[in-house]
Image (cartoon, coloured by chain):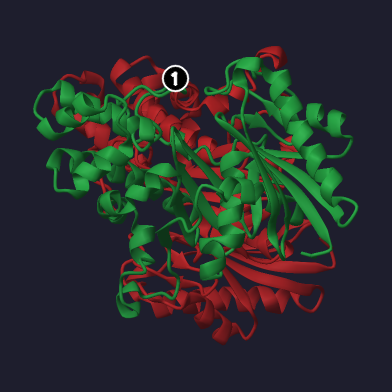
Chain colours: A green, B red
Amino acid sequence: MTSDSFSIGIDFGGTNLRLAAYTPAAGFLETIQMPTRLQAGRDAVVADMCAGIRKLLDRYSSKLALKGIAIGSPGPIELPEGRLRNLPNLPGFDGLELRAAVEQSVGTPVVVENDANVAALAECVAGKGKTLGIDTLCFLTLGTGVGGGIIFHGKIWDGLNGMAGEVGHINIWPDGVACGCGARGCLEPLASATGVRRRAKEMIAAGKSPALAALEKSNPEFTPRDVAGLASAGDRDAQTIFDEVGLALGRGLAALVNTLNLPLYVVGGGLSSSWNLFSPALFGELRYRSYVFRMTDPEKSDAARGTAAKTYVTLTELGPEAGLLGACILPFTVARNGA
Amino acid sequence: MTSDSFSIGIDFGGTNLRLAAYTPAAGFLETIQMPTRLQAGRDAVVADMCAGIRKLLDRYSSKLALKGIAIGSPGPIELPEGRLRNLPNLPGFDGLELRAAVEQSVGTPVVVENDANVAALAECVAGKGKTLGIDTLCFLTLGTGVGGGIIFHGKIWDGLNGMAGEVGHINIWPDGVACGCGARGCLEPLASATGVRRRAKEMIAAGKSPALAALEKSNPEFTPRDVAGLASAGDRDAQTIFDEVGLALGRGLAALVNTLNLPLYVVGGGLSSSWNLFSPALFGELRYRSYVFRMTDPEKSDAARGTAAKTYVTLTELGPEAGLLGACILPFTVARNGA
């Protein structure tokens, strides 16, 4: 990385559109945030994005060389084309050629990536990966849904057409809760903010969870953080919800650990703020389901483990800016790593 | 690859020990097969292996340059050290430093790899990968157990310490059949030769499967191939067993397709001879559980798929020599690809 050049990163979210100019040495030089005008339609959103890019280009391209522009977008997106496909939270965007549209408007090449993939890259370069000196990891992001990204030796693994890392659709309970993907019992509806709310409402409807019922009565729009508050205060029903989140995550992680044998798995996203509530059940299930993890468990003594290798499963070090940071970092990393 | 040099590959199996001298241009120059003398102990087995290597070295190293020696061994093995760990089918081999023992005896560097990983490499270089022009794949081998190997761009993915590709321990039914790994409901006891026999015996014990009962009566040591014979002849109970194998495989493959988005998944091993019996259920479950597969399904028209990318899930092109061939090929590929 050279400090003579800068990048522009864009975090294209369903609520906010954020842009930043960045250098590896200085970090964010400037950030821009605006609401994502979904109601105004896709052309308006693309126009807003391009206006932001032009503003940053005008400001910095006379002083620094442009290393590249990268957009982190919700998936599914086909890569490297940067074509949006049936985004559940962005109706009306199916088929949008995001990369081509932005390139045409700003007149310079643009890279489009999955938002969880760029957050994974940030975690690798500037988060837990950097802290532990590990450049290969899987990042799981627990938000409205469950996303993921895989980094091999500092490079995003896009797979065949950009769909790699869809860890939210690992099956946990074959006949479980319906998932937006069309199947049942995926990780996503179990270990997401949506899942925590759904489970709380189920328990309230069953009439045996007075603290949760009181929460809903006082605040019908209660959040997973409110449920976590009850759990932390000792409510068993609320704690059960997080035990179930941990169990689902542990089972999904076991599939990843057994098949990929990566040195590092990082859990981020909004729901990861409840790490202390769900991680005991996570590790219990992971140890049960993965002999690969048991053989490399960092909690074991070196003698009991019998190998120097350790598999780390940890909480993210980065906050909500991971996605924006990852988009800024992407132009400074090597080219696309796909099948 | 150059035809001026040769490799020696060893397929270290629980029943047979096979060695070959190989060149990329000519293929196998010579093969040696002997029983694996498990009863005689690990030192005897290593001595047999080294005697075979020396014989091939004596024969070919005056004419050709030695590219390298590689051993494919049952797992779990710690890599790159080549240290055997608790092999279920090789009692008494736990802790054996296989690589060091062979290197010391033959006086030349040796590479040790997981047997499913070298079979995956063979499938990539000389099997379906070659046929389809694809160098990135996951290979599943259905034998006594279920093994796997992942190849990224022509290189085996070993992971952190050689445990990558343990696809047999993806969870299929959380409370299912006990697996040798200590968990329940793994793919291995469902989609292996062992699993087919167990399921047939369960159905016989339930007393409602006359054809299976007659098979056991005539041949108590009946094999999955015998069960396949009944299924092919129209017995519904026998067909149900293969439907269940396909369902388990489809669910395991869905986890792989959703997380890795590879272009190619190849099914091999002895039980894969029943591909026609289990693949319909496999594809049914895979389509249900993986929107990534649905988006890239080669059976769909280009218009319906909406993208040029295709995910292939197919039967192996190689026979039982895949493991030996892969061990021979390994020295001609690039260095180890781990975390």
Q: x, y percentage for residue A33?
A: 63, 39
Q: Residue at x 46, y 20 (%)?
A: B284
Left or right: A82 as drawn, with respect to B35:
right
Q: Residue at x 64, y 41 (%)?
A: A159
Q: Is residue B276 above or below residue A11?
A: above
The C terminus of chain A - image quarter:
top right
User: In which image quadrant can residue B208 be found?
Assistant: top left
Q: Is residue A263 above or below residue B279?
A: below
Q: Residue at x 39, y 25 (%)?
A: B229
**Dot 1 alpha-carbon crowd within 10 angstroms: few under 14, some 14 to 19, many 20 or more:** few
Residue under circle 1? Answer: A182
| Residue A81 visible to an observer of this rendering | no
Q: x, y percentage for residue A313?
A: 41, 58
> In this view of the protein, which residue sits in the foreground, A149 or A212?
A212
User: In which image quadrant can residue B172 be found?
Assistant: top left
Amino acid type indicated by mark 1: Gly
| Residue A91 visible to an observer of this rendering | yes
Q: Is residue A85 above or below residue A99?
A: above
> In this view of the protein, which residue sits in the foreground, A158 or A114?
A114
Q: Residue at x 65, y 82 (%)?
A: B108
Badge 1 marks a residue whose secondary structure is: loop
Q: x, y percentage for residue B21?
A: 68, 65
Chain of the residue where label 1 is placed in the rendered structure? A
Left or right: A248 as drawn, with respect to B178:
right
> In this view of the protein, which residue sits in the foreground, A305 or A126?
A126
The N terminus of chain A - image quarter:
bottom right
Q: Is residue B22 above or below residue A140?
A: below
